[in-house]
Image (cartoon, grey):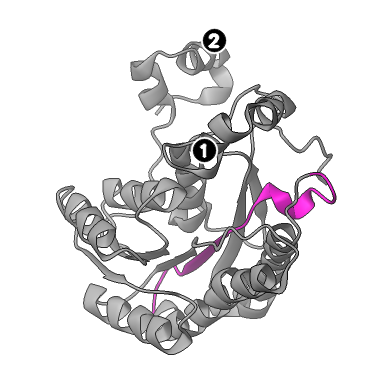
Amino acid sequence: MINVSHNLPLLHQACQGDEHLRATLVDMELSLQGKRALVTGATKGIGRAIAEAFANEGASVAICARNASDVASTVADLQSRGVQATGASIDVSDAETYSAWVESAASELGGLDIFVANVSALAAGWDASSWQAMLETDLLHTTRGYEAAAPFLKRSDCPSLVVVSSVSANLAGVGGGQAYGAVKAALISLASQLAQEIGPAGIRVNTVSPGPIDFPGGFWDRLRVSDPERYANARAAAALGRHGTPEEVARAVVFLASPAASYITGANLKVDGGTLSTVNY
């Protein structure tokens, strides 16, 4: 393994596109082989990339989403990577069905080491239906999912919970999306409190907050056509001058979930290309 701190010129080359050097420099052992991960909302975009990243690291994966055909094709793809994979068509706002699935999926995998709460209603309005959708789909799906997964996580030797939030939690009045931004902020607070509460049991809890992430069929891809000015402004707002990819978020999630991040808990990792120009202490 190359010591990156002593090889900044090589790192620069890797960042400029040298695939061989990039692969060498990021050769970190995540120790995920044989681990068991559950990811919600994992057939498209960020969730799909997270599930694929776990599978590529040798972890078994359970996924859910609402569209049955999307679930089936995603499970088949994950299995083709040589790992155990299972999935179900679930509406996470259906509390009883969702909680039962988390328990059955964990049992099918032979246990659970990692729970990733990723699914979102993406409701950005101020109306009651937007608030209800965000509370049920984002916030309560996280708490219910953890409660169902907790007995399995407590038997793991490396238990971890990762919550996918958003930088919209910090964008007060500047595109936070009313219900969307407020509930995403609540998720960060929830994860921080939960990290303190269940830390003594050895369970780590962290949040990943993506900025604008562009992928085919996603929100920003649609906005490219419907509102090109807003799309361009979001690109310009990032220090790196571009939107991110699902894979870039997935790598952050998988790292935080892995034993390689064994002393990190209660953190909120922004994956936003510098969209939020804040000082973090």
Residue 264 seen by the camera: no
Q: Quadrant of residue 177?
A: bottom right
Residue 250 seen by the camera: yes
Q: Residues within 10 Å of mark 2 (few under 14, many from 20)?
A: few
**Would you say residue 156 sits in the magenta stretch?**
yes
Which region is colored magenta? 155-174
Q: Residue at x 38, y 44 (%)?
A: 29
Q: Residue at x 42, y 84 (%)?
A: 99
Residue 217 at x, y percent in the picture: 43, 41
Q: Residue at x 75, y 51 (%)?
A: 176
Query: 147 or 160: nearer the eye?
Result: 147
Mark 1: amino acid? Arg
Q: For the view shown, which residue lies furthest in the bottom direction?
A: 96
Residue receiving disc 1:
222
Using the numbered discs, state the Cα–Cα distance from disc 2 to disc 1 in whole angstroms.
38 Å
Residue 246 at x, y percent in the picture: 46, 41
Q: Answer above or below: position of 88 versus 119.
A: below
Residue receiving disc 2:
9
Q: Which mark is residue 87?
A: none
Residue 240 at x, y percent in the picture: 65, 23
